[in-house]
Image: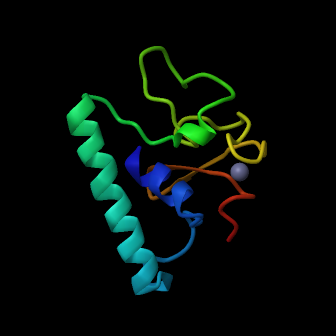
Amino acid sequence: MYRAELLFRHHVSPFRPGTALSADEWDAMWADLVALMKVGVRVGKMVVVRPEDDHGEPSYAPDRPRTYVYRRQGAACRRCGTPVAHAVMEARNLFWCPTCQPD
Ligand SMILES: [Zn+2]
């Protein structure tokens, strides 16, 4: 879940090779992940949606965290309204917004 959400928060396509990330992009993503995980430990649940984006359709399942893209395929992106996409890569589920995370 953190993988899909982190890529969304940083506008990175899940199809972009890790070797194509700049050091600055990597550092920003790492710092964001560390902060998100600290919040998760403190409040006892994953919190990944920024307050300003926390509107629109409910969580993907009862008592599950609200997410930008994780398990929301076909639902409207919380930022731009584009349907969230899904694909399987190497037996892993990918969820992303094609508009917010262009190739
Ligand atoms: Zn979007």
Q: Position of residue 18 (x, y in %)?
A: 44, 77
Q: Position of residue 1 (x, y in %)?
A: 41, 43
Residue pushed farthest front?
52
User: What residue is drawn where x is 45% and y is 58%?
Assistant: 90
103 horizontally vs 64: left or right: right
* Display colour scheme: rainbow
Q: Nearer the viewer, residue 61 or 51?
A: 51
Q: Position of residue 28 (x, y in %)?
A: 41, 71
User: What residue is drawn where x is 54% and y is 63%?
Assistant: 14
Name above or below for residue 33 compared with residue 67.
Answer: below
User: What residue is drawn where x is 40% and y is 66%?
Assistant: 29
Name above or below for residue 102 compared with residue 71.
Answer: below
Q: Nearer the viewer, residue 5 or 91?
A: 5
Q: Nearer the viewer, residue 39 or 58?
A: 39
Residue pushed farthest top?
62
82 horizontally vs 65: left or right: right
Q: How many marks?
A: 0
